[in-house]
Image (cartoon, rainbow, N blue to C red):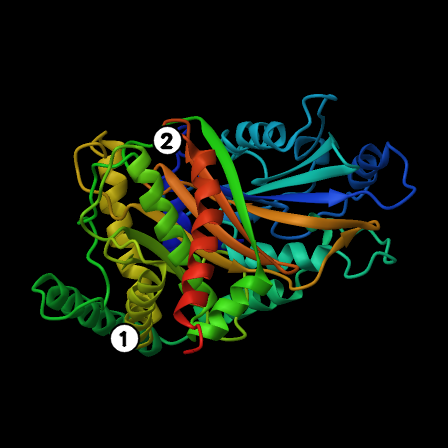
């Protein structure tokens, strides 16, 4: 039995039919050479046969009137309630058909009477491909942890045909973390008070930074919450119905820009998103005069720390003032991110976590009261970045060619964007409500913005004649 953290609990409190709080991943595989057409169907049957379910995939949430909710392990898990098979028909098996199916699968809430996860095998894709779509409640783990679990369940070579489904792998690090958590609960009252004092000092420091920013005495320490322009299609009351789109860029091209401009992957990716979002908003008749503000999750785990649950904070980051020059946009965003990084490093992680909860509660109250259309949003959208495996992974010899992250929507935001690097590609996963117009076009603009940035960097670094 494990108690939930306040952040994990918040995902349950904020959850509704219109805004479920699970996250997912779409993994697209290519069948091995000379494999039968029934490869994916056979894989589904093989997966059903792996009935040894490990923690946390055998846990259900238990709510109590007398204390914090807890995770409790069940005696057995019926895989037919968690594992599903779908087959797309010929002529209805294009990429957009796959995305429509996954959007429909991503909408419903997970049944809280059962362990909060599902795996869907999707057969019949063109060019000898099939897909696995996985979804799991966000209270179970953050994105970095889920990626680690997925990597541990897959093979690193095509010749390794052992089947180790996600739910069957004993995540030793997670078990070690659980042990650490039990030991932590036995710490002295003095240590608890010391931790509370550190948290309070961190909150005070963060509040002072925000006050200085609000008084315009500092610039880009951290963007203020609830000052983003709410007159865009990106924000409002979250409603049921989802749509999904993607974009991807070669990591080799990204690294070349990073090397030439002394930038990071985050700098380059956010520059592309900033340009794409401005282009998209202009198409929709919105001409922003101020920078786009994003909500950005930050990993609060110490180096080498692993475990279940969530250990993240969400801060607001101001991107570039409007400009037509991608190179200038890159420099502006680099300046903003460096200052934000310095701020995060100077504040205790617990303070960032508390700040995340406070701002999230305010936004959630607005959504629950139906006020998200009238009140300013925390930010224009949420953008997260999850590093993935650098090499291809396999399941029974089938190579995973693409992995697209699919996240949840925060209160007041109709769009969430997740970046994921895998096997030489940087993938952009865009999940939105049905209310957001022309999501697919935004995906195209991401690729265009990268090409524009690439050309601008090359022009800026031309040797003098």
Residue at the farthest left position = 215
* Residue at the spot 79% in from the left edge and 44% down from the top edge: 50
Left or right, residue 190 beside residue 288: right
Residue 436 shows which numbered tag? 2
Give the class, few, some or many, for how many residues have Cα within 10 Å of label 2's Cα (few <14, many ≥20).
some
SS at mark 1?
Answer: helix
Residue 198 shows which numbered tag? 1
Foreground of the two, 70 or 88: 88
Left or right, residue 42 beside residue 87: right
Q: Position of residue 173 (x, y in %)?
A: 62, 67
Q: Position of residue 228 (x, y in %)?
A: 21, 48
* Residue at the spot 17% in from the left edge and 38% down from the top edge: 375
Question: Which callout, 1 or 2, points at the residue further toward the start of the chain?
Answer: 1
| Residue 68 appears in the rendering | no
* Residue at the spot 68% in from the left edge and 40% down from the top edge: 132
Q: Looking at the rendering, in which quadrant would you find the C terminus?
A: bottom left
Q: Is residue 214 above or below residue 50?
A: below
Left or right, residue 175 beside residue 364: right
Foreground of the two, 450 or 386: 450
| Residue 421 appears in the rendering | yes
* Residue at the spot 85% in from the left edge and 37% down from the top edge: 39
SS at mark 2?
Answer: loop
Q: CA distance from mark 1 to mark 2?
A: 42 Å
**Front of the two marks 1 and 2:** 2
Tag 1 and tag 2, C-beta contact below 8 Å: no
Q: Position of residue 230 (x, y in %)?
A: 21, 39
């Amino acid at each position: 039995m494990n108690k939930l953290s306040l952040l994990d609990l918040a995902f349950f409190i904020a959850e509704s039919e219109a805004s479920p709080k699970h996250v997912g991943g779409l993994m697209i595989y290519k069948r091995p050479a000379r494999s039968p057409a029934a490869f994916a169907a056979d894989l589904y049957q093989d997966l059903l046969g792996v009935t040894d379910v490990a923690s946390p995939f055998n846990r259900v949430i238990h709510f109590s009137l007398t204390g914090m909710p807890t995770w409790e392990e069940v005696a057995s898990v019926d895989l037919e309630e968690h594992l599903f098979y779908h087959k797309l028909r010929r002529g209805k098996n294009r990429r957009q058909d796959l995305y429509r199916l996954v959007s429909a699968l991503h909408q419903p809430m997970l049944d809280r009477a059962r362990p909060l996860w599902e795996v869907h095998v999707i057969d019949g894709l063109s060019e000898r491909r099939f897909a696995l779509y996985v979804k799991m409640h966000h209270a179970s783990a953050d994105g970095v942890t889920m990626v680690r679990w997925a990597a541990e369940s897959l093979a690193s070579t095509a010749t390794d045909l052992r089947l180790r489904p996600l739910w069957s792998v004993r995540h030793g690090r997670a078990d070690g973390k659980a042990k650490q958590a039990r030991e932590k609960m036995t710490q002295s009252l003095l240590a608890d008070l010391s931790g509370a004092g550190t948290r309070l000092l961190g909150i005070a420091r963060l509040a002072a930074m925000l006050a200085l920013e609000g008084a315009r005495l500092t610039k880009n320490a951290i963007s203020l919450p609830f000052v983003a322009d709410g007159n865009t299609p990106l924000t409002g009351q979250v409603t049921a119905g989802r749509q999904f789109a993607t974009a991807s860029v070669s990591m080799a091209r990204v690294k070349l820009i990073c090397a030439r401009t002394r930038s990071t992957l985050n700098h380059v990716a956010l520059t592309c998103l900033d340009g794409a979002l401005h282009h998209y908003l202009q198409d929709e008749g919105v001409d922003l005069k101020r920078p786009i503000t994003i909500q950005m999750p930050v990993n609060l785990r110490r180096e080498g720390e692993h475990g279940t649950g969530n250990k993240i904070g969400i801060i607001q980051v101001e991107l570039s003032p409007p400009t037509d020059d991608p190179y200038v946009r890159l420099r502006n965003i680099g300046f903003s991110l460096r200052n934000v990084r310095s701020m995060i490093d100077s504040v205790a992680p617990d303070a960032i976590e508390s700040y995340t909860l406070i701002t999230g509660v305010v936004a959630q109250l607005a959504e629950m009261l139906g006020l998200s259309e009238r009140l300013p949003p925390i930010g224009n959208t949420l953008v997260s970045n999850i590093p993935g495996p650098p090499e291809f992974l396999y399941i029974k010899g089938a190579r995973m060619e693409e992995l697209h992250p699919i996240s949840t929507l925060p209160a007041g935001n109709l769009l969430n964007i997740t970046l994921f690097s895998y096997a030489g590609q940087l993938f952009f996963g865009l999940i939105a409500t049905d209310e957001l117009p022309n999501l697919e076009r935004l995906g195209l603009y991401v690729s265009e913005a990268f090409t524009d940035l690439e050309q601008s960097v090359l022009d800026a670094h031309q040797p003098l004649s």
